[in-house]
Amino acid sequence: MAKRVLVVEDNELNLKLFCDLLRAHGYETAPVRDGREAVSTARTFAPDLVITDIQLPHISGLDIIGRMKSDGMLKKVPIMAVTAYAGQDDEARVRAAGANAYVTKPISVMRFVEEVQALI
């Protein structure tokens, strides 16, 4: 059975790229364009990994991470943050929120896939 990855990204091109990459490596994906739907979708999809952008409209990726980590059903699911923020303080803040991995945009395809494989 394929591992399941929930992808939370508001940028259509990035969402397509991430999902296409994941599918090419044998993962089942669930794309979410609106971060407000991330937790409810995760609860029904039961992902093995969540990949989320940090800078989203309506709700930040940090809030999504916090909500998932405080949800009894989702708290053990690893989370990979993908963000344009590239400062050392930014990574520390994202990891402190509960992210298990931090990848900066523009992504390196190899690093992205390696991080996914390491988390699942």
Image: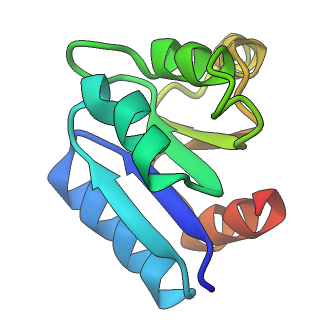
Placement of the N terminus among the 4 image quadrants? bottom right
Position of 97 with respect to 18 (left or right) is right
Residue 41, quarter of the rendered image: top left
Identify which residue, 97 or 108, lies in the foreground.
97
Position of 82 with respect to 59 (left or right) is right
Residue in view at x 21 percent, y 42 percent: 33
Q: Position of residue 84 (x, y in %)?
A: 45, 33
Q: Position of residue 62 (x, y in %)?
A: 52, 15
Q: Position of residue 36 (x, y in %)?
A: 27, 23
Residue 18 seen from this side: no
Residue 56, quarter of the rendered image: top left
Q: Note whether 29 is above or below 91 in the view shown.
A: below
Q: Residue furthest right?
A: 118
Residue in view at x 48 percent, y 12 percent: 63
Q: Note whether 44 is above or below 22 in the view shown.
A: above
Position of 52 with respect to 119 (left or right) is left
Placement of the C terminus among the 4 image quadrants? bottom right
Q: Position of residue 116 (x, y in %)?
A: 68, 63
Identify which residue, 119 or 39, lies in the foreground.
39
Residue 2 seen from this side: yes
